[in-house]
Image: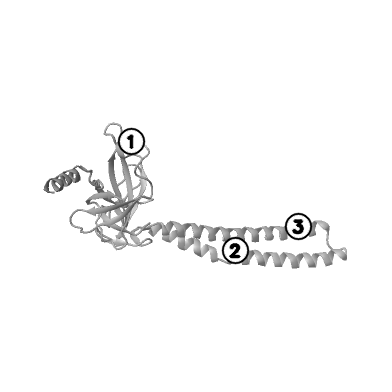
Amino acid sequence: MTRRIVLLCLLTALLPAHAEPAVHECLIEPAQRLEIRSPVEALIDAVNVDRGSRVRKGDVLLQLNSDIEQAALAAARYRAVMKGAIRSAETRIAYSREKLRRLEEIQRRKFASAQERDDVLAELHLAEAELLEAQDDRELAVLEGRRLAEVVAQRSLRSPVDAVVTERLQNPGELAQTGDGASAILRLAKIDALHVEVVLPVAQYGSVQLGAVATVEPEYPQQGRYEAVVAIVDPVVDSASGTFRVRLNLPNPELGITAGVKCRLRFH
């Protein structure tokens, strides 16, 4: 009986154990990194955020100087409501029409020539053209005002996403530049959604599919396990290392997971 028990134990030990899912080293990254640059060369009037500030989409991050644009906008808006040129043209039209009416009465009595009537008619047409020109100028001023309002609005640089400020590179009074080599003013990171980057051996290529779920365990200072979903499987293998990369999406709505930390990952 004892020999049977020992033999059974030996056979059980030789049976293949249930394989545990492989553990892979990974890295948790922000879903998006952004650099805030100026669309124009201008002095920085104010920077409303600092490193570590949390911002919402649409928040004004910084203000560029817009004194010249503000003055041009005020002038355009004033031209858009000016009535002097229009009233002057309307007065000339009314005068020319009355003059033409009287001249036609005189002409019917044979006391005015056709040339005199033609002269008055030409004055009327010129006055009508002046009215159209004044109306066009007013409409152009309205359109110019809208354009300048957009230019002024562009001097307020807003956050395109919910994010956290990771770097502040320039301060009020400094010149924001454009073009190649121009420095960013701020750097942001979107951390309410994260990416988990992992490099896998080529032997696993084809076993990881889009939509697959994995358990992610961040290293210090986080504790806990989180589920992430495969979003990208690189279609090209790195022949030099015999590996390929996979990206997973990891929701972080409460901002409880720190971006930039290493992690361990197991596919389900």
Label 3 – label 1 distance at C-alpha: 87 Å
Instruction: Tell me which amino acid carries mark 3.
Output: Asp
| Nearest to the observer: residue 37 or residue 122 | 37
Task: Identify the residue position indicated by label 3 in the image.
Answer: 119
Disc assigned to residue 127:
none
Whether pointer 2 and pointer 1 mark residues with C-beta atoms closer than 8 Å, the reply is: no
Say which element carries label 3. helix
- Going 72% across and 58% down the picture, which residue do you hit? 125
Instruction: Tell me which amino acid carries mark 2.
Output: Ala
Compared to residue 126, the image places residue 106 above or below, namely below
Instruction: Tell me which amino acid carries mark 1.
Output: Val
Q: Position of residue 249 (x, y in %)?
A: 34, 52
Going by the picture, which residue comes out furthest to the front?
1
- Discs 2/1, front: 1
| Nearest to the observer: residue 31 or residue 51 | 31
Compared to residue 6, the image places residue 48 above or below, namely below
Label 3 – label 2 distance at C-alpha: 23 Å
- Discs 3/2, front: 2
Q: Position of residue 13 (x, y in %)?
A: 18, 45
Tally of numbered discs: 3
Q: Is residue 155 shown left or right of residue 54?
A: right
Say which element carries label 2. helix
Task: Identify the residue position indicated by label 1 in the image.
Answer: 237
- Where residue 140 sits, quadrant-wise, is bottom right
Label 2 – label 1 distance at C-alpha: 73 Å
Disc assigned to residue 85:
2
Q: Earlier in the sequence, mark 3 or mark 2?
A: 2
Observer able to see residue 48: no
* Mark 2: few/some/many CA within 10 Å (<14, 14-19, 20+): some
* Mark 1: few/some/many CA within 10 Å (<14, 14-19, 20+): some
Q: Position of residue 7 (x, y in %)?
A: 15, 44
Say which element carries label 1. loop
